[in-house]
Image: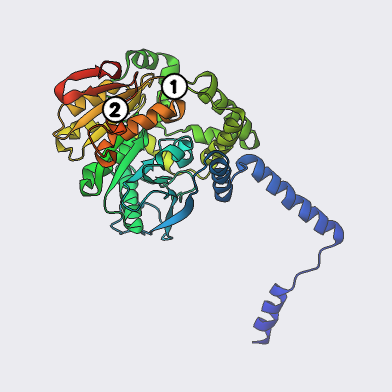
Amino acid sequence: MRRVVAKRMAERITVPQTAAELSADASSKSWLKTWKQCLRWSPTSKEDTIQAEKRLLTSLVKTPYVQEQVNIGSGPPGSRVRWFRSESNEDRFINTVTFDKVPPDAPTLVMVHGYGAAQGFFFRNFDALAERFRVMAIDQIGWGASSRPDFTCKSTEETESWFVESLEEWRKAKKLDKFILLGHSLGGYVAARYALKHPENVEHLILVGSAGFASELDQRLLEFRSTWKGAFINYLWESNVTPQQFVRFVGPWGPQIVRGYTGARFGTRNAGAVLDDNESKLLSDYIFHTLAARPSGEYCLKYIFAFGAKPRSPLANSASEWKVPTSFIYGTEDWMDWKGAQKASESMDVPTEIIRVPQGGHFVFMENAPDFHSAVFYACRKFLAKGSQDQFNKLPPGIILTRPLRNETVSRGQM
């Protein structure tokens, strides 16, 4: 017994290190930490994302708002909450901003961002829309300042459920009964899938430059895919290599690269109103933190779309199941083809319309905000208009209105 005790005591005794050894050990740990930072470090965190959002909104939006992390619960293995595919059982949160300056009976507008974005991209729209709606904008699960659980979905169906059911859990947490749902690009695809599954919750659907309706690739994309560059990019796509991975890989050079991208995408390559210096600085900082944060929702792309944004499960296939009146809004310069939505709407047994806004591309809500707001008000005229002569029953000249069910196209200049 004594031998056992002595042995254990000896095992616990450590020989004090000399000053030189302590210094060498500290230097080694410091070098290891520095090396790990060089390999993995990207100057961002969830708190950085929230602060970047705050700087953007408080500087550029006049309407007061409330920011909150809405708890949508957890879903450990075996849970019925299908959006949750992580091994962790911790609660998840949806980052939400609410603009609530209108009377209690005003309609609620829920806004859902697209791929590689977050709710702050609507910064040019909040003031105008908050005059007529109770506006609630969210970061989808795995994006922005929302929780970023491990993304382990392996099919289109699982991936759709991941987003749709997290949105439904958010709705339950916020106790919303009826609302107008607006989604942009990938957010439009998610909004459409949500409305197909939960039509009882959605009064009207607004799809802005929505993905999911193109049935065929553009001829230029087909030609590009036949080149070695196109084949290589297609390989990266199918391997689920994302742009965000590059931003993380370059670490401390990421902010500078994102500033260059923001300046080009919303400046020299913009179809409408460009960002001023302050907007560009604040937005690029915000974009960097949303892109460089922990990977999660970004891995959805491979499972929902093939290269070129061709949907693996086209929304047109569900057109006959559509139960929610829908307004499509496109910029006239949008690379998303509005004719796909037109063709799909011809099989929908609900009121539909396509509104095309001039001087606007894929980010029409940012590029031509005034006409975009007019398009949204017109789409929601049923909820906003007080009479036949109400301003919301009209669209400004230059905006094109198409009603596919009647196969009729009218320019507002002719109405």
**Label number found at residue 206:** none
Q: In this view, does 255 lie to the left or right of 384?
A: right
Residue sitting nearer the eye, 87 or 403: 403
- The part of the image, by quadrant, that contains residue 297 is top left
Q: In this view, does 316 lie above or below 33?
A: above
Residue sitting nearer the eye, 144 or 66: 66
Specify whether residue 312 is in view: no
**Label number found at residue 232:** 1
Please name the amino acid that badge 1 sits on.
Phe
Q: In this view, does 64 lie above or below 281?
A: below
Please name the amino acid that badge 2 sits on.
Lys
Q: Distance between the residues labelled 2 and 1?
A: 48 Å
- The part of the image, by quadrant, that contains residue 251 is top right
Asked whether the beta carbons under mark 2 and mark 1 sit within 8 Å of each other, the answer is no
Q: Residue at x 78, y 51 (%)?
A: 27
* Residue of label 2: 394
Q: Which residue is drawn at 34% across and 25% down?
A: 330
* Spot occupied by residue 161 in the image (x, y as percentages of width and height): 30, 46
Residue sitting nearer the eye, 293 or 176: 176
